[in-house]
Image: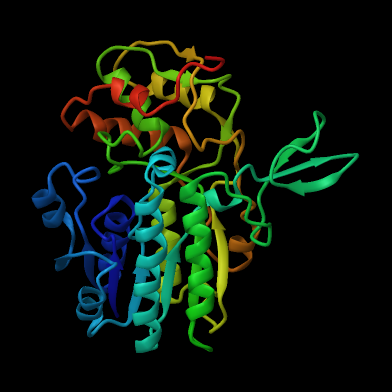
């Protein structure tokens, strides 16, 4: 099987490519090698276990040429920073919606299977439940409401430009899918683990913790620290993608499949910072600061039962191991200025 990965040289793509190659698949990547993500583009290309075409998914001719001779397409290429999307909405829409349309249209023309990487950001504040209002989506209904895991059939209640662009990308996939061709939408939660760009201030909170720990400072948690996320290891996500690509999961039936990917476990940001501090080579506590990032939400967690019913691999890597492996990788890279994250956060709450 020959598999083309758009954005294949990135964090998830590299792990997926290695897993597919280990199963005997031929893999190739179409990637723009964005310097915000790839500090060393040459080294990134060399790590990929197959040919790499440097190009833009918005370019019809480039996409058409890249797909020739392949059996399956995995569309990972995207602009992914929630906070950054709030200040550069045009680019996020252009790459994540128009780019998806170009890739999906060519995949449909060739009649190939497609796996599209969406995001938990489409759920926004997600679901809540209480005795008075039952289960609702789009934010806390009242003070008694407790967060509830997001289901695949929940409404799209995004609160960021990134979430909106991924929601519209899903609409493109649904509109262009050829009848009877197996197309899949995977919605991952917060993906962590080795290989995540430690220098990218939009890549996630764990990179921010690592940057401070690397210079002997305590990780800083914005807000109360009680915000929760569903962290899933990149190797678990790559394993599920491998199943979907090779047909090992039961979703390759010709129907459009939309499925969550996560651990199904809520972890507070305060807990995550504590884990990072514990496994770090540095001795440090945890600090709280009254800042917030544009587009951030209070709680997120996936209901992962559909994936289990479909036979997708259950999450296997514990969060502590994921964090430790990421920090080990981050320590192998050049030191990053920890103030980068403060520059993309909003002013102090109340100002």
**x 64%, y 60%: residue:** 152
Is 20 in front, or is 77?
A: 77
Is 322 in front, or is 112?
A: 112
Quadrant of the image occupied by residue 337: top left
**x 80%, y 28%: residue:** 143
Does 155 appear above or below 87? below
Quadrant of the image occupied by residue 247: bottom left
Does 41 appear above or below 221? below
The reply to whether residue 34 is visible in this rendering is yes
Q: Position of residue 155 (x, y in %)?
A: 67, 57
Does 138 appear above or below 211? below
Is 177 in front, or is 214?
A: 177
Quadrant of the image occupied by residue 72: bottom left
**x 25%, y 15%: residue:** 215
Point out the image quarter for the N terminus.
Answer: bottom left
The reply to whether residue 313 is visible in this rendering is no
- Residue furthest out toward the right: 132
Does 84 appear above or below 21? above
């Amino acid at each position: 099987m020959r598999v083309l990965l758009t954005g294949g040289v990135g964090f998830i793509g590299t792990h997926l490519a290695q897993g597919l190659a280990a199963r005997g698949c031929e893999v190739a990547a179409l990637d723009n090698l964005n310097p915000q993500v790839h500090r060393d583009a040459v080294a990134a290309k060399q790590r990929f276990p197959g040919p790499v075409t440097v190009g833009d998914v918005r370019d019809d001719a480039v996409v058409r040429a890249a797909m020739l001779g392949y059996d399956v397409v995995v569309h990972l290429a995207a602009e992914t920073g929630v906070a950054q999307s709030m200040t550069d909405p045009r680019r996020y829409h252009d790459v994540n919606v128009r780019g998806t349309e170009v890739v999906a249209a060519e995949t449909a023309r060739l009649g190939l299977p497609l796996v599209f990487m969406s995001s938990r950001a489409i759920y926004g504040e997600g679901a809540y439940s209480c005795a008075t209002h039952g289960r609702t989506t789009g934010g806390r209904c009242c003070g008694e409401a407790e967060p509830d895991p997001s289901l695949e059939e929940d409404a799209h209640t995004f609160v960021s430009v990134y979430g909106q662009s991924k929601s519209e990308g899903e609409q493109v996939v649904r509109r262009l899918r050829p009848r009877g061709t197996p197309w899949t939408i995977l919605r991952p939660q917060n993906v962590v683990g080795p290989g995540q760009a430690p220098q990218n201030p939009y890549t996630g909170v764990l990179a921010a913790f690592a940057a401070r720990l690397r210079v002997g400072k305590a990780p800083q948690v914005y807000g109360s620290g009680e915000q929760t996320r569903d962290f899933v290891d990149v190797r678990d996500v790559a394993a599920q993608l491998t199943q979907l690509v090779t047909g090992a999961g039961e979703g390759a039936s010709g129907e459009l499949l939309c499925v969550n990917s996560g651990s199904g476990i809520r972890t507070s940001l305060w807990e995550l910072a504590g884990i990072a501090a514990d496994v770090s080579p540095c001795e440090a506590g945890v600090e709280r600061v009254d800042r917030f990032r544009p587009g951030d939400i209070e709680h997120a967690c996936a209901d992962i039962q559909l994936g289990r019913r479909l036979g997708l691999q259950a999450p296997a890597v514990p969060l502590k191991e994921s964090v430790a492996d990421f920090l080990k990788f981050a320590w192998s890279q050049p030191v990053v200025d920890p103030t980068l994250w403060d520059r993309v956060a909003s002013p102090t709450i109340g100002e």
